[in-house]
Amino acid sequence: MVTIYDIAKKANVSAMTVSRVINNTGRISEKTRSKVKRVMEELNYVPNHMARSLVLQQTNLLFLLITDITNPFYTTLSRGAEDAARKYGYRLLFGNSDETLEKEADYINTILATRVDGVLIAPTGDSSLPNLERLQSSSVPFVLLDREVPGMEADLVLGDSRDGARRLVEHLSDLGHRRIAMVNGVSTTSSARLRLQGYLDGMKLNDLPVHEGYMHESSFRPIDDYSHIEAWLDHMQPFPTAILAGNNVLAVETIRMLHKRGLRVPEDISVVGFDDLGPFSEVDPFLTVISQQAYQFGYTGTQMLIERIQSRDQPDPWKKIVLPSDLLVRRSVRDLRHQ
Amino acid sequence: MVTIYDIAKKANVSAMTVSRVINNTGRISEKTRSKVKRVMEELNYVPNHMARSLVLQQTNLLFLLITDITNPFYTTLSRGAEDAARKYGYRLLFGNSDETLEKEADYINTILATRVDGVLIAPTGDSSLPNLERLQSSSVPFVLLDREVPGMEADLVLGDSRDGARRLVEHLSDLGHRRIAMVNGVSTTSSARLRLQGYLDGMKLNDLPVHEGYMHESSFRPIDDYSHIEAWLDHMQPFPTAILAGNNVLAVETIRMLHKRGLRVPEDISVVGFDDLGPFSEVDPFLTVISQQAYQFGYTGTQMLIERIQSRDQPDPWKKIVLPSDLLVRRSVRDLRHQ
DNA sequence: TTGTATGCGTTATCAC
DNA sequence: GTGATAACGCATACAA
């Protein structure tokens, strides 16, 4: 690999002059500048970011840690983060914790060792606290995405989970549904807790009874065994006319289990969910969902992070941004009003 | 940030000893080893990858450059690459060229400057050649994914585009379709060329006429304006009974344009595509597709890359792996046999 | 306008 | 077993 010294020697200047040409600093005569530039081209010089970062004590690198790269919500979010990072001259490193605390801890090590300038992280849940504290004690700026962690003050980009769930219940109620069940992610995740709250809000506001066993805890990420959902379906008494799923994965898997039991959606039972199924869901729009602005999560979060990085000296108070979401009415809900 | 010197001072040893403890090299007495380890924990030491890479002349970093992060084919591929990279102790950097030559060139700069150990790249097309040559002349090992580039010898992971397209035509033909049109990506991309070839193969083998204007060139990535597809639909004479889309994006957009014209799929016209619509397409399986093993593209490609990196001295001949694909028959094709 | 010396955090080499 | 020194590629402070 060619270094600034190779350039310097060939251009008959010092390495320092080359460095100045590269960074456009200091005063340089037009003649030497162009000579150096020509040699750089000739030798196909590419600066070494690592050496540069080592002396500058900054990497221009951000790290985005999401919990499920196969989930369109997070890939769209990633796209937003990437665009924002590029716009402000940062590069983006990328990790996928798989909703697993250990992988998350592992990535935190990588993050610290890589000396990235900042981190965007969707924590796996409340138990991410120690992982976040490691970032904090190394004073690496970070922004929390999609989920809060009790005990951790930080910049934050959230959706309106609670109100979103409430609106889904209301929508079902408007169409005549009274027996509404909910399958959710683990309650150690703030978004799951808020969506459950919103569900209960909606049930109460619309005078709907919450029967015993109507709330079931599963997982936000794809898992191998969904027999617990089958068992849950088998035991609900009375059987619901609609199910609210805590995210898109759960909506899909619940529908799969319903099909397995010979139940059609929406003819036999209605299903609504949280987060859309991806950029292609419009081909054959099926699932009625609360759709969050995934791209904005990433874009806004990255902007907040970069602001935080660039004003490290005068720390502003923590910011919390709540992004609104849309109710997309499609055809997974049956109208029960004229029965 | 705490360095090995901080550790060394506190543990009353030299920095070198600390380094040896960290890397498990050389001979160290159990006593000093445990002492150093304790101090490391106390001080919350995290090694600095950049400094390490600078002297070792390797980063343990791979770069994956895909062309469309919103496309489930590539995100699933990414997941495979990530898993393989982790398994072999590499970290994965990540970029999205958006099917744009300029962004790709930009990322090549980043890649070279970051001194990654290897690159996985899905080139935007034939004109990626100069970009790849830059990698080559810097002797950065790389593996081509999903697309070949004429004039560039390299390790390669491909799908069976040509045969896949042929099978789609055959499937349509089996169901009584004779007028089959094709909308494709730009012909400067090898996969588009091969799929066109496969389409032509299929038409010929099944004695189907290729009417004038039945082949239309669009784009593999989402673009703003699809009016050219509308115009194409309006001008085909005779109007086809089925359309073969060169990838998933085109399938979706074609269906959208058909809907816009009041045509139902599959009642009025059938559509088949290449690559599945993502992990959730099974909820309401609609589009009949040739589904490629996206995960394997990433996993296998990464393995090939790592092998190539680790045997830099005895360069093996280039490897080319062709992954088989599946025909997933769903309900976007109408059976015309009993008309 | 340009050059010299020094240090960023780590490891390899060689000495003790 | 352990330590001193140089080197990786670059940029800053200070000279010239």
Image: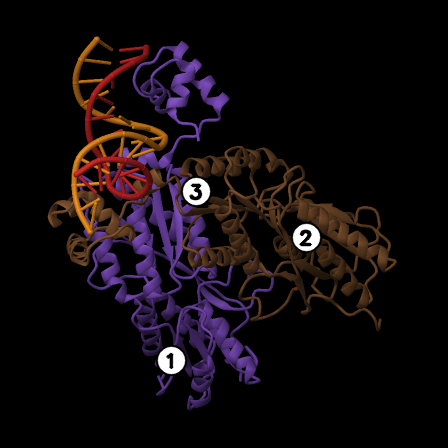
Chain colours: A purple, B brown, C red, D orange
Element type where label 3 sits in the image: loop
Label 2: chain letter: B
Image point (50%, 58%), residue name = B80
Task: Look at the picture and state if B223 lies above or below A268.
Answer: above
Which one is in front in this view, the residue at disc 3 or the one at disc 2? 3
Distance Cα–Cα, label 2 vs label 1: 42 Å
Q: Circle 1 marks a residue in which chain?
A: A
Task: Please tell me if label 2 and label 1 are on a single chain.
Answer: no
Say which of marks 2 and 1 sits in front. 2
Count the marks. 3
How packed mark 2 is, by other alpha carbons closer than 10 Å (few <14, some 14-19, many 20 or more), is: many
Between marks 1 and 3, how big is the CA–CA gap? Answer: 46 Å
Closer-to-camera residue (B136/A165)? B136
Q: Quadrant of residue D13?
A: top left
Rendered position, B145 above or below B284: above
In percent of width and height, residue B291 lies at 63, 62
Q: Position of residue B57 (x, y in %)?
A: 39, 39
Which residue is disc 3 drawn over? B116
| SS state under label 1 | strand
Q: Which residue matches tag 2? A: B246
Picture disc at residue B330: none
Q: How crowded is mark 3: few (under 14 residues within 10 Å), some or many (20 or more)?
A: many
Q: Report which residue position mark 1 lands on.
A: A216
**Distance in Å between CA atoms under marks 3 and 2:** 33 Å
Q: Which of marks 3 and 2 is nearer the N terminus?
A: 3
Q: How crowded is mark 1: few (under 14 residues within 10 Å), some or many (20 or more)?
A: some
User: Which of the 4 image quadrants contains residue A185?
Assistant: bottom left
